[in-house]
């Protein structure tokens, strides 16, 4: 009834486009790299990893839709943030590119792969 509905508001927020997400997470990664004093070689690959993370996120969001049996297959910006939060929380910063890529791959598996329930989805 209108009497009940007057207590509620509808808020809608559109998804960000890839350019906006790239800008946000590139700034976060650049800040972390400066703070962790990463080498220029490692920082040169960080923007590539941001784009790769967004590509993984978009692929999973597009192909692994929620169903009644897989209702937890909902993905949002928080998942991308969890990947970079895990990368930035490492004790000793990565010394070279392979170490950064290994850390990044581990965090992607932790955030996205661990949520998948069957081998076909994995």
Image: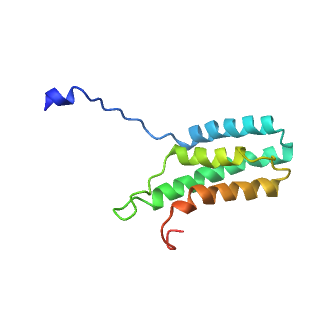
Q: Position of residue 81 (x, y in %)?
A: 59, 44
120 vs 41, nearest the viewer = 120
x, y percentage for residue 121? 50, 68
Query: Is 48 or 83 nearer to us in this picture?
Result: 83
Residue located 57% across and 62% down the image? 113
Residue 112 lies in what quarter of the image?
Answer: bottom right
The location of residue 94, given as percent across then percent down, is: 81, 50
Residue 30 in the figure: left or right of residue 117: right
Quadrant including the N terminus? top left
Percent coordinates x, y for residue 60 in the rendering: 51, 58
Which residue corresponds to the image point at 71% horizontal and 40% vertical from the top-left? 29
Would residue 122 be found to the left or right of residue 43 on screen? left
**Relative side of 1 to 43, left or right:** left
Q: Residue at x 66, y 48 (%)?
A: 86
Please state which of residues 77 and 4 is positioned toward the viewer in this rendering.
4
Residues 58 and 6: in front is 6
């Amino acid at each position: 009834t209108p009497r009940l509905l007057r207590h509620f508001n509808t808020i809608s927020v559109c998804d960000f486009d890839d350019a906006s997400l790239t800008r946000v997470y590139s700034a976060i990664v650049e800040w972390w790299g400066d703070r962790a004093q990463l080498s220029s070689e490692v920082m040169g690959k960080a923007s590539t990893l941001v784009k790769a993370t967004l590509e993984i996120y978009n692929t999973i969001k597009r192909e692994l839709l929620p169903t009644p049996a897989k209702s937890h297959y909902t993905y949002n910006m928080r998942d991308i943030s969890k990947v970079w939060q895990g990368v930035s929380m490492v004790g000793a910063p990565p010394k070279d590119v392979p170490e950064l890529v290994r850390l990044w791959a581990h965090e992607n598996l932790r955030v996205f792969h661990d949520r998948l329930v069957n081998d076909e989805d994995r």
